[in-house]
Amino acid sequence: MQKGVSFFLTILFILPLILFSVESSAQEIEEKMVVVKGTDDWKNTKIKLYPQDKVTIRASGQICFSSQYCNIAKVDADGWDKNTYQADWPGDYAYCFDPLRQVNHAALIGNVGSDDFFIGKDANFTGKDGVLYLRVNDCSLTGDFGNSGQFEVFISVKHFK
């Protein structure tokens, strides 16, 4: 009788742990390639994120952030160093304020809900809740200080159920 009760109690306590472990590891992977042009305002990726999702983003390509000086104003998705941008490009800097002044000029940035954040060439994050938007961190997408070029952005999201 004691063996039966002991076995029953073991199953009673261990089975929920096993089921919880299987349930918490259930996931779906969503992958998408998005092109973010230098002239695009916030681009809707149509990817809905949840706080428990694990997001990986890799970006390649180049943006020219000053059409008059495209031979030297090219950057990858990490952008132009924010510490030298004002001195290197005073006219561009004075024209208007970038969406995220605390990150590199013309870098790839993201938005989910009311949260704007740096992405650059390589980002991993969790804890976001809402649709993911992308753009170049530049206030003058067109016009005298307009942009050309594009970033090719690969997004991989592990959605945990």
Image (cartoon, rainbow, N blue to C red):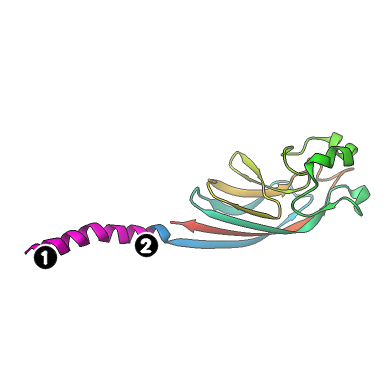
**Residue underneath mark 1:** 3
Magenta stretch, residue numbers: 1-23
Residue drawn at x 90%, y 49% as measured from the top left = 67
Location of residue 47 in the rendering, given as x and y in whole percent from the top left corner: 58, 54
* Residue 131 in the image: above or below residue 157: above
Task: Identify which amino acid the numbered label 2 is placed on.
Answer: Val
Whether the magenta-drawn stretch holds residue 17 is answered as: yes
Under tag 1, what secondary structure? helix
> In this image, 51 relative to 87: left or right?
left
Location of residue 13 in the rendering, given as x and y in whole percent from the top left corner: 23, 57
Residue nearer the viewer, 30 or 123: 123
Q: Is the C terminus in the top left, top right, bottom left or bottom right quadrant?
A: bottom left
Q: Is residue 106 visible?
A: yes
Mark drawn on residue 22: 2
Residue drawn at x 64%, y 48% as measured from the top left = 133
Location of residue 33 in the rendering, given as x and y in whole percent from the top left corner: 66, 62
